[in-house]
Image: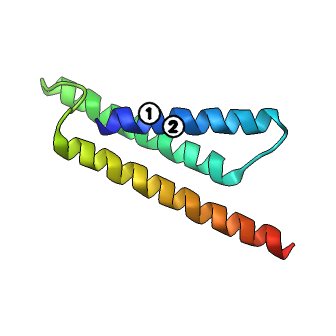
Amino acid sequence: MCEIMTIAAAVIFTVIFVAQKNKGHFSKPVFATMLMFWGAALMWAVDGIASVLEGEPFFDISMEDTILGFIILGAGLAIFAFMLLINRAKKARA
């Protein structure tokens, strides 16, 4: 379940990044968060492949895996919020 949640977050941040880039903006926090979620999705994909090679299903649809997915999403969004605050503080000083 954490794989599905992480891919969804990566796709959402990718859409936001592309929309901003098409308007001529470049947001470092959005870009960094997008890369973090894609990296996590790649990590979970490798874990899923290892699970398949051991005879288990690719997606783990358990409560523990869902909780892990929410923890990953929460941590990613917290880092995104922190980067936004730093970015706005730098712009306010300039």
Q: Which amino acid does label 1 sit on?
A: Ile
Residue contact at pointers 2 and 1, CB within 8 angstroms:
yes
Q: Which residue is drawn at 38% across and 37% down?
A: 5
Q: Which amino acid does label 2 sit on?
A: Ala
Q: What element carries label 1?
A: helix
Q: Which residue is drawn at 49% across and 60% down?
A: 78
Residue 63, image x and y in percent?
A: 18, 42
Quarter containing the C terminus: bottom right
Of the pair 36 and 77, the residue shown nearer to us? 77
Residue 52, image x and y in percent?
A: 20, 24
Residue 69, image x and y in percent?
A: 32, 45
Residue at the extreme left of the image, as rendered = 55
Residue named by callout 2: 10
22 in relation to 66, above or below: above
Q: What element carries label 2?
A: helix
> Label 1 crowding class (10 Å Cα cut-off): few <14, some 14-19, many 20+?
some
Residue named by callout 1: 7
Of the pair 51 and 14, the residue shown nearer to us? 14
